[in-house]
Image (spheres, coloured by chain):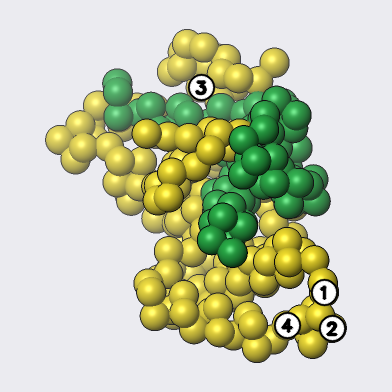
Chain colours: A yellow, B green
């Protein structure tokens, strides 16, 4: 059961997002990150009387720490461009990779020829190589929002190209 | 092909999506509405659209909800 962001949540649920993910930390890593985050919080923030505000500060601090933590033992470097792993990352059955090859080749063509170099670098890092968005933000010194906007524009551009070239039939949500 | 549904969903963009900064700025209010059973998505459709598309912000949202409901 998938609850929307406006609906009451079950106690445990799987993330709704498909490709842009936060760091997938194991339990011990997460514990260390949380401990680090608490340790680094300025004492002035411990004294904020609003418990919601304190929680928000801690969660944002943990998100930031998780991003930086990724680079201690990075599984992939920036600009690696592991396109051969994209079908697996998209959950495509290996038996059907050949069937998907056409549209994925078109995605790669659009990424290579129609995205700006900045869009291409961030798209490849996040979507193709699977670098967590917060980890990329920490490494490049960019805000999460800045990277999200770049990927948002890249997604729109790729979808338009796929529709224009007959790979997708509907224009999607964009208007 | 059905397996490409994930790619297609990822490539969809919602013009109401407010982005990370605006979503985070009101996330505590949004969470309060959700926990109280209010129509958070109706009140903040741009935030709802963003949380459906942005993994990190969605996880912050989930963490805040769990912090509030377990606190």
Q: Quadrant of the N terminus of chain A?
A: top left
How far, Cα to Cα, is label 4 from label 3? 46 Å
Tag shown at residue A162 = 3
Labels 3 and 1 within one chain = yes
**Residue A172 rendering spot, x and y as whole percentages:** 56, 18
The chain under label 2 reads A
| Residue A147 can be seen, yes or no | yes
* Element type at mark 2: helix
Q: Looking at the picture, tell me which residue is in the foreground, A126 or A98.
A: A126
The chain under label 3 reads A
| In front: label 2 or label 1 | 1
How far, Cα to Cα, is label 2 from label 3? 51 Å
Tag shown at residue A44 = 2
Q: Earlier in the sequence, mark 2 or mark 3?
A: 2
| In front: label 2 or label 3 | 2
Tag shown at residue A48 = 1
Q: Are marks 4 and 3 in contact (CB under 8 Å)?
A: no
* Label 4 crowd (10 A; few <14 / some 14-19 / many >=20): few
Does B65 sit left or right of A149 as displayed?
A: left
How far, Cα to Cα, is label 2 from label 1? 7 Å
The chain under label 4 reads A
Q: Earlier in the sequence, mark 4 or mark 1?
A: 4
Q: Quadrant of the C terminus of chain A?
A: top right
Labels 4 and 3 within one chain = yes
How far, Cα to Cα, is label 4 from label 1? 12 Å
What is the number of callouts on the image?
4
In the rendered image, the vertical position of residue A43 relative to residue A80, given as above or below: below
Does A100 sit left or right of A121 as displayed?
A: left
């Amino acid at each position: 059961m998938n609850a929307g962001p406006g609906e009451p949540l079950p106690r445990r649920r799987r993330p709704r997002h498909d490709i842009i993910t936060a760091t997938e930390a194991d339990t011990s890593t997460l514990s260390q990150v949380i401990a680090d985050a608490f340790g680094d919080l300025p004492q002035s923030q411990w004294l904020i009387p609003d418990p919601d505000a304190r929680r928000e500060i801690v969660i944002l601090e943990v998100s930031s720490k998780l991003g930086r933590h990724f680079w201690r033992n990075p599984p992939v470097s920036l600009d690696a461009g592991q396109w051969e792993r994209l079908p697996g990352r998209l959950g495509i059955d290996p038996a059907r990779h050949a069937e998907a090859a056409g549209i994925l080749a078109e995605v790669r063509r659009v990424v290579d020829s129609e995205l700006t170099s900045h869009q291409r670098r961030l798209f490849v890092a996040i979507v193709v190589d699977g670098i967590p968005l917060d980890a990329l933000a920490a490494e490049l010194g960019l805000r999460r929002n800045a990277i999200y906007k770049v990927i948002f524009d890249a997604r729109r551009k790729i979808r338009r190209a796929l529709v224009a070239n007959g790979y997708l039939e509907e224009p999607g949500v964009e208007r | 092909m059905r397996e490409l549904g994930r790619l297609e969903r990822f490539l969809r963009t919602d013009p109401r999506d407010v982005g990370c900064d605006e979503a985070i700025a009101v996330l505590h209010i949004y969470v309060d509405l959700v926990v109280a059973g209010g129509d958070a998505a109706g009140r903040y459709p741009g935030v709802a659209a963003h949380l459906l598309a942005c993994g990190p912000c969605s996880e912050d949202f989930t963490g805040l909800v769990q912090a509030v409901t377990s606190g």
